């Protein structure tokens, strides 16, 4: 159920009449800026970093559903196959302070009821950034695992480069009872070439499956990274993304501080995962981290949102610190996967590949840059949804890079912005679009409501000409787009009815539907409408979009 209890949502409703009566005199700056026939017409889940609400939007930026929490996201949110929302939440900590802090999880049903909540926040462990839900329903998440500087020194970390605390990455899988059923920790897979008398001594180049406990320590000891100072040094790896491949039974991680992507084996027991079998299966992006490359071999610069697309990987490469200038790219590549589930590696060279399968844009530009957060998603039609998170900008591109849809998040930490104003404080960690036939939408009311921005102007959607039906049993409305009338074909049953809603969910026309008929639309404003039909046959119960041009 869409919630209207937040004060700014009441303001939004009060200003709708103004938005309808007065077309925006200035160019749109918020909400849907572009919506073409080549866009994949689904529903986008949006969890603005500054808001406690999570929204499901159609391609015109209209709210189809929303959920309100007491907490801001921490940071990811996804829909479950049954239509429930699962999101991480920010919980305060006296120990862990850093970018992407989470600590808790919530699951909400479609009607906005809290199904369950659970914490992964103690003085020794704190969940952050991202998580994924496994096919069995268990939640797999990344967390900071706290160790003292003395512990790190005892594992071979250079004392001169060691902060009072050292946080390593821990991956936990928990079931619906909040029981830890599987775990993996970087702490069990360290290598060091600092002191031969200490554990894990060896050359990183000859142990590419292990993580050099001294790599990157020099820069971090000076306070580089989120938060600065000792806490930045403590957050030594800053892993910010996780995904799971069910066929390979493998987990992929993104370490922002190492500028690397790591893959580990989930098909092990926790005990096995703590041993050599739990070493990294694959790593990519910065071979300097394991002594098999130079700065010239580095590919990633503070990347986010790595995940599988088939057997390929897709990532948002933020580009922070890129030598030729700060600009972002979205990159897809094919890891050198072998038939036994391992990855090809030369005796001395870094992991491949040398070439990418796809990159956006083909030529880097400072006009596309997000220094933090951000992500990308390959959509069913072959287009790619990109979240330029620092600017709150979402856009969809075709394989050739053509932009076919664009949206700017209007929600800030103090509420929504007015259409036409310059966006600010509207960051988004990532976004995901779900197809109309997504299992969680079955039997749900997907009638669009108002957009998020105040004084909305949806003229960017008035030229949309290829909209698939939202329910089984396609109803052919024609002409579509049209001008003065809508033709309804005869129902297959003996009785029926129809209802037409406008952009704001208000009924503009309704009546019986017992035979083919023309519905007079001559007095309706131009724009998008939703036509509901119902009758004796299930095929007659449809929800179809109609455009008045």
Image: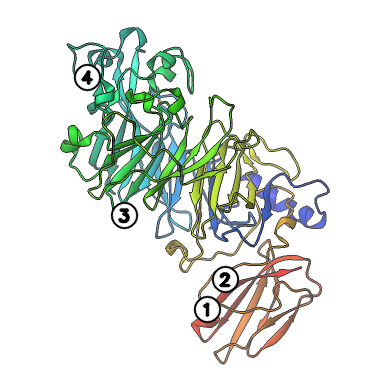
What residue would you read off at disc 4? 202
- Secondary structure beneath disc 1? loop
Say the numbered circle drawn on residue 473.
1
State yes or no: discs 2 and 3 in contact (Cβ < 8 Å): no
Residues at marks 4 and 3, CA–CA distance in whole angstroms: 38 Å
What residue would you read off at disc 3? 135
- Secondary structure beneath disc 3? loop
Camera sees residue 190: yes
- Secondary structure beneath disc 4? loop
- Dot 1 surroundings within 10 Å: few (below 14), some, or many (20 or more)? some
| Residue 222 drawn above or below residue 104 | above
Residues at marks 1 and 2, CA–CA distance in whole angstroms: 8 Å
Q: Nearer the viewer, mark 4 or mark 2?
A: 4
- Secondary structure beneath disc 2? loop
Q: If the image is split into quadrants, where does the C terminus sit?
A: bottom right
State yes or no: discs 1 and 2 in contact (Cβ < 8 Å): yes
Disc count in the image?
Answer: 4
């Amino acid at each position: 159920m869409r919630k209207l209890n937040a004060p700014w949502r009441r303001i939004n409703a009060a200003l709708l009449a103004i938005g309808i009566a007065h077309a925006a005199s200035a160019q749109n700056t918020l909400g849907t800026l572009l919506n073409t026939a080549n866009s994949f017409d689904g529903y986008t889940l949006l969890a603005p970093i500054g808001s406690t609400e999570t929204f499901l939007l159609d391609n015109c930026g209209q709210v189809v559903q929303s959920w309100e929490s007491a907490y801001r996201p921490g940071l990811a949110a996804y829909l479950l196959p049954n239509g429930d929302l699962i999101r991480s939440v920010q919980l305060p900590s006296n120990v862990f302070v850093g970018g992407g802090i989470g600590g808790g999880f919530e699951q909400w049903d479609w009607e906005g009821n809290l199904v369950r909540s659970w914490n992964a926040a103690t003085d020794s462990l704190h969940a952050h950034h991202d998580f994924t839900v496994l096919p069995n329903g268990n939640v797999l998440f990344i967390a900071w695992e706290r160790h003292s500087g003395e512990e790190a020194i005892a594992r071979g970390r250079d004392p001169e480069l060691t902060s009072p605390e050292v946080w390593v990455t821990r991956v936990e899988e928990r079931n619906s009872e909040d029981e830890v059923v599987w775990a993996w920790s970087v702490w069990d897979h360290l290598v060091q070439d600092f002191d031969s008398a200490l554990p894990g001594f060896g050359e990183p180049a000859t142990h590419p499956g292990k993580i050099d406990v001294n790599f990157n320590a020099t820069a971090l000891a000076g306070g580089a990274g989120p938060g600065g100072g000792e806490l930045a040094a403590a957050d030594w790896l800053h892993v910010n993304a996780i995904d799971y491949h069910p066929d390979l039974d493998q987990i992929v991680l993104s370490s922002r501080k190492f500028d690397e992507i790591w893959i580990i084996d989930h098909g092990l027991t926790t005990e096995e995962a703590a041993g050599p079998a739990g070493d990294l299966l694959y790593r990519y992006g910065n071979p300097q981290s394991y002594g098999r490359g130079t700065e010239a071999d580095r590919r990633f610069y503070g990347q986010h949102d790595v995940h599988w697309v088939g057997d390929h990987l897709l990532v948002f490469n933020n580009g922070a610190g890129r030598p030729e200038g700060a600009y972002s790219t979205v990159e897809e590549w094919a890891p050198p996967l072998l038939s036994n589930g391992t990855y090809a590696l030369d005796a001395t060279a870094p992991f491949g590949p040398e070439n990418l399968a796809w990159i956006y844009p083909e030529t880097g530009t400072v006009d596309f840059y997000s220094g933090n957060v951000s992500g990308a998603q390959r959509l069913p039609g072959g287009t790619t949804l990109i979240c330029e998170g620092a600017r709150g900008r979402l856009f969809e591109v075709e394989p050739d890079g053509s932009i076919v849809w664009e949206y700017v998040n209007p929600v800030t930490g103090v509420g929504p912005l007015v259409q036409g104003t310059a966006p600010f404080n509207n960051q988004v960690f990532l976004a995901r679009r779900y197809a109309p036939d997504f299992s969680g939408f079955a039997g749900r009311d997907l009638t669009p409501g108002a957009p998020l921005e105040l004084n909305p102007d949806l003229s960017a959607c008035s030229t949309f000409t290829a909209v698939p039906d939202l329910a089984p049993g396609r109803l052919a409305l024609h002409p579509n787009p049209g001008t003065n009338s809508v033709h309804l074909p005869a129902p297959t049953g003996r009785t029926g009815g129809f209802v037409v809603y406008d952009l704001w969910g208000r009924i503009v026309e309704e009546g019986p539907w017992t035979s083919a008929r023309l519905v007079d639309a001559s007095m309706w404003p131009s724009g998008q409408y939703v036509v509901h039909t119902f009758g004796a046959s299930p095929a007659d119960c449809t929800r179809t979009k109609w455009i008045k041009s």
